[in-house]
Image (cartoon, helix red, strand yellow):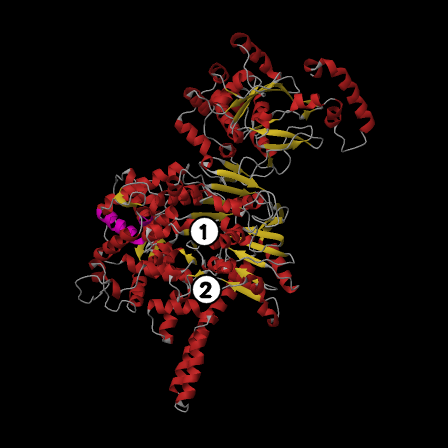
Amino acid sequence: MIQEIYPEFAAEIKANKQKFKDVFKWCENFNINDEMNKINPKFYESFTKSEKLNNFDKIKLVKDKKEPEAGTIWKTEPVKGIYKDIEPNYKNNVGILTGRNNLIIIDIDEKDEGLKNYNDYIEKNGIINTFTVKTPCGGYHLYFNSTSKNEKDNKTIKDKIKNSIKYRGVGIDVRCDNGYAVAPGSFFNDKLYYIYNNSEIADIPSDFLNWITEDVKPATSQEKEEYNNNVYEYEMNDEQFKAIINQLDNEYKNNYKLWLKITAICKYHNKFNIWDEWSKGSDKYNQYKNIKYWRNSNLNLDINYICKILDIKQIKKFKLMNYNTVKNIENFDYIQYNNKFVFDSEYEEQQYDYKLFNEYETTILKSCPGSGKTTAVAQHIEQYLKENPNTKFLSIVDRISLAQQHTKSFQNIDIKSYTDKKINFLNCRSLVCCINSLEKLATLTKEEKQEYIIFIDEITSFLNLTHNKLLDKNIKNIYNLLMSLIKNAKKVIVADAIIMDNIYQFLKLRIEEKEIIKPLYISNNYLKFKNIKAVKVNDENIMLNKIIEQCKNNEPFLFGSDSATKATEWYNICLSKVPKTEHHKFLLLTAQTGIVISNAEEEFKNKFVFYSPTITYGVDFSIEKEQNVYIYQEGKSILPNGSYQQATRCRNIKTLYFYSVDVENYAKYKNFEDVKYQLNESIKYHNSLINVSTIYDEKTEDYKIIENSFFNLYTYTEYFIDIYKTGMACHFIKLLSLNGFVITEEGEKNKLSAEMKQMIKNMTTEIKENLFNEYVETLTEIKKINDDEKLEAEEKTEQQYKKIKYLYENKFLAINKSIEFLNIPKDNEILELYKNEITNKYNLQDHLNIIRTLRSNEYINKKIQLANINSYEVKNMTLIYNKIKFIRQFEETYNIKPLEVDFINEGDIEMNDEQYNYIKNIFRISQKKPETYEQLKRIYISMLRNITNNNLIQSKRGTKKEERNVRYYNINDDVIKYHLKLNEYSNPDKKYFNDFFKNKYDIEEAKIKFIDDEDNFNDFDVDEMCELLDIII
């Protein structure tokens, strides 16, 4: 190779190279290339360096190998180990990233006739003049631009050029999106990659492109959608895959149709070598033809197809999430660095300094928890407000805890909180405001909005506002005001540890409005929790014993769970294991306990802290001494990114232990576009039922049918939830790994023993019972004091005041809220009767839904009209009143009386696809489309159970021998009467019931002519009420 290019000093180099090996072989830091470069600088420069490569993203490869260094991440965000200014050296090789640098690199191998075929092409079409690297094995890397000036070629590139091997069935491989190629200057088996042609990187010639891809069959759009969007990760390694495939009968190797299916499965899992080796077991093996079939295979089959054939256990899988990816990244000025803090005044290298803050009007700031995102913004805001006296600052949050944190973080600018009832929002120069109070800024003019700098921290969680039931009452007004603020503000800064596609959608109107000034996207790739041990405890007993042991040893920890019930249960069991003198060290934070944390560093210090989803972010616990954190993930109320936020509240973690309930669900949607399609179809059908067809367009401020930004954000959230639910535990582990945690496992899969579960259940029931009894006894004591004639009036008042004050302590918060909401008199006998609704939020919700099911059509229609004014179609479809309205229409269509679950209609039915898909999406059922009345009955009962409790509908099997597989259903009238009686306390006039139910249940309604919203409870407050009753999530 050397003689080939520089024969005049080849001998000199060869001699010296041997000399260097002999003399310096003992020195591990010795670099032959550097020593040869000292002899003649022309050597290394000419072979290995080119200005054309300077600005490309690169990764480190293992020394003398082609594999990336361990821990390198370049395919997904957060990236790790990407550099621009590295060169091959004695420690490592270097890889040039392809897709990330807008490159296609064609690898022509000498083996498998790749070079021979390429030489045949050259003889016919001439040499291709583009940047070229000669490989140690005698082949070439041809560098091309990933896009061409020829649109026809661009289509071919899009349809046929993929990261793959054996193009034309020979040794020609392609590296493009998410690929890389070994850089010149690197070594493989002691042989050098060197620059063969230092020309400019060219567009790929049309003839060459067509020649390479002539055997590639482009997938149809449907095939591409199915194949490319079902991206799953399987809990299976190569050895397991090989073991499964080798269990197949030889028929699958020799029968063409069966072999094609196994080929498709192997391609889906990218197991070419295993497939090729397995295929060699057939007498019909033909490598050239097989590779053509491999390249053109597009069937969407996975390993579980084989598991089904073999009748063995299915392989667990979960759908992958593209974390920290933003569409249209080319519209941003993109800066990445790897700093411990987002901004440090003493640091002189690249960072988010005041100059960048001042220069850009729109900024996305991605950095890990504890890296000072909020602190950096606070410092820059302080300086900016001093320099710009007319500018105002607004932090918009979605949690009280985050508002309290910002009150502390931005105290340097005297920020005011929305919780302060004395302030005037419009007069505050610096304000932190919760999203549900944003309407207090509704009177701002466009010019006044342009004076605001808006900061939204934890933006990924914030955008879940589309699914926040607490905003249903006025989401349309709130969202329209929010979008107007975002569009017109002087500056907008959003920040989070995870940045997703929906954030660009959220900022889209602003970015398009200010298209002259590019937004800034900063990615700080520092990992605060790098190399922290995260132990997946498979045995629930081991997890519990670890926690109890720490309690006994007085070793404080944090315990977070996505279930308030679980947090409460484990708090109680730990409390029972230590002396009462130690109970003051234990802290339980749920919505029920009502404890507000203002300074975690003080309030969590030396404490055993148990918390529910009430604490996900906005509470930062920074301590000098590291301590353990425990996470219990049931996969219910919050998503894996919420569990990750719970895990990282402690900024100095010793070891993270987590127990996850592994639940695998199939993805409901193929991809993002499929979500949009299904939601749109449901909206169309929904509107045909209720005759509503307009939504608000915040861009033109006209009413017309459009896909507005709220719909798109809602769609993103639906899609993210769907992906997460395919494997909540797996996604939590993925997030931990991406953020630097080192994952290990402990124990075999095992749940708590039945005895322990029963003990915990009994203990929890007893504690709840004791709390309720204590409340009732206090009421009794107040009554006794009032009836005690011996007490003087002043003393009586004083004693009553103490007791009443005690009743309103935090531990009775949920009980008081329920009693007040239901308007139940504080009579001990009545309270005991309705104890379940008072102490259990699900029982309360069941009560409300049963009453709603009995409402009149007029009442239901009015509620729907109010919802259409205040909210969006995509949310209103799942509104309880729309569900009830649909059920009423459903009953009329199929000749069923109201709540007639025992109807005896027989025969076949015809349900159209639109109605069936609507039912499936809105009521979340999985039954097949009904074709008979018997099948329809099961659908009908599922719909009713979706909105009411299981106690309402009773079922039993037939008693006769021929009826044992038959189920009979009926409505439990006693349950309905029970709830009607409870409803009388909040609705004494028994108003707004359906005539059918008034007749059936003897409801005597007061005479009214119209519905007066003021004299009935506000349904939108129900969900807020139930959030406070966070007892058994």
Residues at marks 1 and 2, CA–CA distance in whole angstroms: 30 Å
Q: Which residues are magenta?
A: 875-892
Residue 77 position, x and y percent, is 53, 39
Q: Please give the name of the residue rendered at 43% of the width and 48% of the height, measured from the top-left corner.
A: 491
- Pick the quarter of the image with the N terminus: top right
- Pick the quarter of the image with the C terminus: bottom left
In the foreground, 352 or 316: 352
Q: Residues within 10 Å of mark 1 (few under 14, many from 20)?
A: many
Whether residue 607 appears in magenta in the rendering, the answer is no
Please say if 744 is above or below 224.
below
Q: Residues within 10 Å of mark 2 (few under 14, many from 20)?
A: many
Q: Please give the name of the residue rendered at 54% of the width and 14% of the height, measured from the top-left corner.
A: 128
The number of discs equals 2
Residue 754 position, x and y percent, is 54, 57
Outermost residue on the top side: it is: 124
- Residue kind at label 1, given as amino acid type: Phe
Q: What mark, if any, has residue 720 been given in the picture?
A: none
Residue 772 position, x and y percent, is 44, 71
In the foreground, 111 or 961: 111
Q: Quadrant of residue 390?
A: bottom left
Q: Please give the name of the residue rendered at 56% of the width and 35% of the height, measured from the top-left corner.
A: 74
In the foreground, 560 or 540: 560
Residue 663 in view: no
Residue identifier under label 1: 455
Please say if 189 is above or below 502.
above
Nearest to N terminus: mark 1 or mark 2:
1
Residue identifier under label 2: 592
Could you tell me what secondary structure mostly forms the magenta stretch?
helix
Disc 1, SS: strand
Residue 755 position, x and y percent, is 55, 60
